[in-house]
Amino acid sequence: MAFASNSGGGPMSDMNVTPLVDVMLVLLIIFMVTAPPLTYPIDVNLPQKSLNPPPQTREPPPPIRLRIDASGQVFWNDAPQPITAIEDMMKAEVQRDPSNQPMLEIDTSPDADYGILAKVLAHAKNANMEKIGFVQN
């Protein structure tokens, strides 16, 4: 035999592992396809298209500028605020006039922690803020 490595010329005693590798790859693909995704959905109420928008008779209030820097500090109209106080501030703004809410303009640093932004969005949802926008740099 041309592939035999022993010098005696007898039959090879090595096990053929090719079928075993094929079965393992098929099992790996099956487990990868059936594994649950590691993402959790966040419910977002998007505005729906309206053919006849209601007329605005009142002047909208000035927007709220909320900035998150790279260190995780949250600024409410350029004033630093703890993340725990943000939801109460949002609720106060909504209760002032629920039908004419100010726009919440969120500006984040590219190096900011996503967890802080997720907390801010959760606070905005809990405060029933309807007008949220993201500032692009």
Image: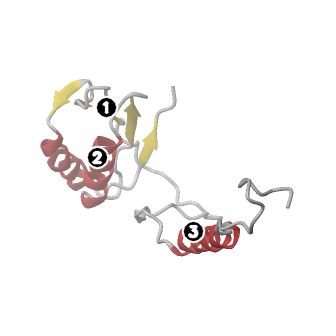
Dots 1 and 2: beta carbons under 8 Å?
yes
75 up-or-down from 92: above or below: above
Q: Which residue is at the far right?
A: 2
* Quadrant in which the N terminus appears: bottom right
Indicate the position of residue 106 as horizontal and vertical percent values. 38, 37
Q: Report the residue at 23% width, 48% height from top.
A: 90
Of the two numbered discs 3 and 1 in the rendering, the one whose residue sits closer to the viewer: 3
Checking the image for residue 120, the label placed there is: 2
Going by the numbered disc 2, the residue's amino acid type is Val
> Taking 133 as reference, is 52 left or right?
right
Going by the numbered disc 3, the residue's amino acid type is Leu
The quadrant where residue 11 appears: bottom right
Going by the numbered disc 1, the residue's amino acid type is Ile
Q: Earlier in the sequence, mark 3 or mark 1?
A: 3
Residue at mark 3: 28
Q: Residues within 10 Å of mark 3 (few under 14, many from 20)?
A: few
Q: Report the residue at 73% width, 59% height from top.
A: 8
Q: Report the residue at 25% width, 60% height from top.
A: 126
Q: Which element is circle 2 on?
A: helix
Q: Earlier in the sequence, mark 3 or mark 2?
A: 3
The quadrant where residue 13 appears: bottom right
Indicate the position of residue 83 as horizontal and vertical percent values. 18, 41
Residue at mark 1: 68
Depth order, front residue of 21/99: 21
